[in-house]
Image (cartoon, rainbow, N blue to C red):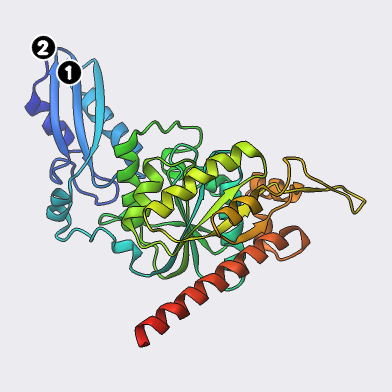
Amino acid sequence: MSVNKDQVIEALKQVKDPELNKSLVELGMIKDVEIAGSNVRVTVALTMAGCPLKDKIKSDVKAAVSKLPGVDQVSVVLTTMTSAERAKLFGQEPSEMEGMKGVKNVIAIASGKGGVGKSTVSVNLAAALSHKGFKVGILDADMHGPDIPIMLGIKERPVGSKGMLFPLEKYGIKMMSTGVLAGEGTPIVWRGPLVNKAIKEFLGHVAWGDLDFLIVDLPPGTGDAPLTVATTIPIKGVIIVTTPQKVALSDVRRSVGLFLKHDIPILGIVENMSYLKVPGSEEVMDIFGSGGGEKVAKAFKLPLLAKIPIEPEIRKGGDEGKPVALEENEKSSAFYELAEKVMDILEKKSQVQKDKTTG
């Protein structure tokens, strides 16, 4: 005896959305049921991309349908509701940039290539700004290498309500990342359109609240994600991270070109892994060469914001989920100097804008 569609729908009426506590059928989340002999395929539309409860919904659907006589195999396909469907479900769909309303300054951290320490700069700049008393958040927009949760020591998963996700918080820093949605060790194989959609969801459908700074850790290169952020929200400025060696500098020139092309202001260059202080002496070793960051900054008439040394405590802080810049000391001094320069540049830009308005 083979199962039919009505029996599957009836079984799915018992499966509830964990957040809304209503049947998936009642909520209109069951988009399709396909039956081929003893195999059943159910398509479920989640309320938002990267729903933190997607795994539970998937397992609950499988469990309910598997109990039916004549069913040997159940597969669940997850899609996302359209804006119109969400609006109908919640009564009023949050506006595209609802979550950004209370954010004063968005600063993007970019790099031309991977492995230059962009996430390290993002986390420690956020920690330094937070230590100075500012309200700070980090959006981990590096979908394929989301390291921010590890660097902040965050393992929890976020919750949502009425189309909005609530960021997780550690050390007074709010954070959202695909790393906490997918789970540790889960590969994220999204292509361009899905990456763009997820970033827009994170920007506008995360309840960031009131923030003085939102640090956006971009993926390396000049692909979809940097372009999405650059063209979706009003960025106060981009900080570009590089290392001294020639190959990194070649790539950073392309990254600078991307933002200049879209009239996105670049705050300056950060040279990471700039030098190594030899323990017990005053000697400095240029492991990856020297002067590269200064050359790029000079070529594009940009300030060199900081030269971050190779420092074991910086690496250790990232690995242990306790950024070195949580405290202001000799080991973290470069990040505090960076924070000071960023604040100074933004203050001058704000004053120029005021003068234009009043003048």
Secondary structure beneath disc 1?
Answer: loop
What residue appears at the point 78 percent right and 44 percent down from the top-left corner? 286
Task: Say which of 21 and 196 sits in front.
Answer: 196
Residue 226: x %, y % from top left = 41, 47
Q: Nearer the viewer, residue 318 or 271?
A: 271
Tell whether 139 sits left or right of 152: left
- In contact (CB < 8 Å): disc 1 and disc 2: yes
Point out the residue furthest to the right here: 280
Q: Earlier in the sequence, mark 1 or mark 2?
A: 2
Residue carrying label 2 = 1
Neighbour class for label 2 at 10 Å: few (<14), some, many (≥20)? few
Look at 24% across and 47% down and name the residue there.
47
Give the residue type that dot 1 points to: Pro
**Residue at image mark 1:** 69
Residue 50 makes an appearance in the image: no
Residue lying at 13% horizontally and 45% vertically, measured from the top left: 26
Neighbours of disc 1 within 10 Å: few (<14), some (14-19), many (20+): few
Whether residue 290 is situated above or below residue 75 in the rendered picture: below
* Percent position of residue 124, x then y: 61, 57
Amino acid type, callout 2: Met
| Position of 46 relative to 100 (above/below) | above
Residue drawn at x 61%, y 72% is 132
